[in-house]
Image: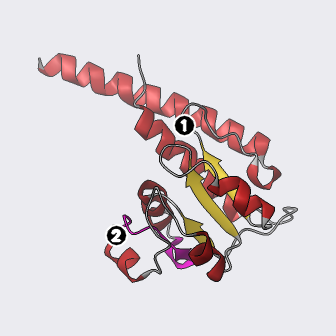
Amino acid sequence: MKINRHFFFKAAIFVLLLSLLGESGAAASPPRRIVSLAPNITEIVFGLGLGDRLVGVTTYCDFPRAVLKKPKIGGFSNPSLEAILALRPDAVILTEDGNPPEIAPRLEKLGISIHVFRSSSSTRGSIMSRASFTSATAEMLERLILSISDASMSIWMMDA
């Protein structure tokens, strides 16, 4: 059965953000000032109750309503490097599907922690050295998605 890629992408972001929260004794402290370069990332950050950590978003980020008060760093496909730097972020979260490919290396060169989501592969915790935790969580989410999908299909077949 084919898994909805958008749902899995959101689940991968959820796993990443869990790892950003850190555990006691983690080697790196979780970022306090985050810039999101994609609307779906912004929504998930707010959904996790971390909207207060977002210091910048794109002009396309319009949900939830609280995001409308956040500073804008430009568009999804044309973020302003200067606007991002002015916000002094601890981390910038972006996506391979829409953000310009040159933005990630430029941010890294300036010493800003970044994470690029690639829809073709799942995130396994390269951020914050949490690979085993996030890998296990991602596998659990994959099993959960499959079981929900199977259950939904069974209910749908019964109604048909």
Q: CA distance from mark 1 to mark 2?
A: 25 Å
The kind of residue on which mark 1 rests is Leu
Asked whether the viewer can see residue 15, the reply is yes
Instruction: Give the quarter of the image for residue 118.
Output: top right
In the image, what residue occupies the spot 46% across and 63% down? 42
Please identify the residue farthest to the left as the structure is shown. Answer: 160
Whole-percent x, y for residue 67 in the image: 40, 75
Residue 64 vs residue 60, the one in the foreground:
60
Whole-percent x, y for residue 134 in the image: 69, 44
Whole-percent x, y for residue 3 in the image: 43, 26
Name the residue tied to disc 1. Answer: 141
Residue 83 vs residue 46, the one in the foreground:
83
Q: How many marks?
A: 2
Image position of 142 with respect to 60: above or below:
above
Q: Which residues are magenta?
A: 50-61
Name the residue tied to disc 2. Answer: 64
From the image, which quarter does the N terminus lie in?
top left
Whole-percent x, y for residue 111 in the image: 80, 67
Q: How dense is the environment of label 2, judged by Cα within 10 Å: few (below 14), some, or many (20 and up)?
A: few
Image position of 105 with respect to 12: above or below:
below
In the image, what residue occupies the spot 37% across and 27% down? 149
Asked whether the viewer can see residue 19, the reply is no
From the image, which quarter does the C terminus lie in?
top left
Judge from the rendering whether residue 105 lies leftward or rightward of residue 79; answer left or right. right
Instruction: Give the quarter of the image for residue 34.
Output: bottom right
The reply to whether the magenta stretch includes residue 128 is no
Judge from the rendering whether residue 69 lies leftward or rightward of residue 84; answer left or right. left
The reply to whether the magenta stretch includes residue 54 is yes
Residue 93 — which label? none
Whichever of callouts 1 and 2 sits on the residue coming sooner in the sequence is 2
Q: Are marks 1 and 2 in contact (CB under 8 Å)?
A: no
The kind of residue on which mark 2 rests is Pro
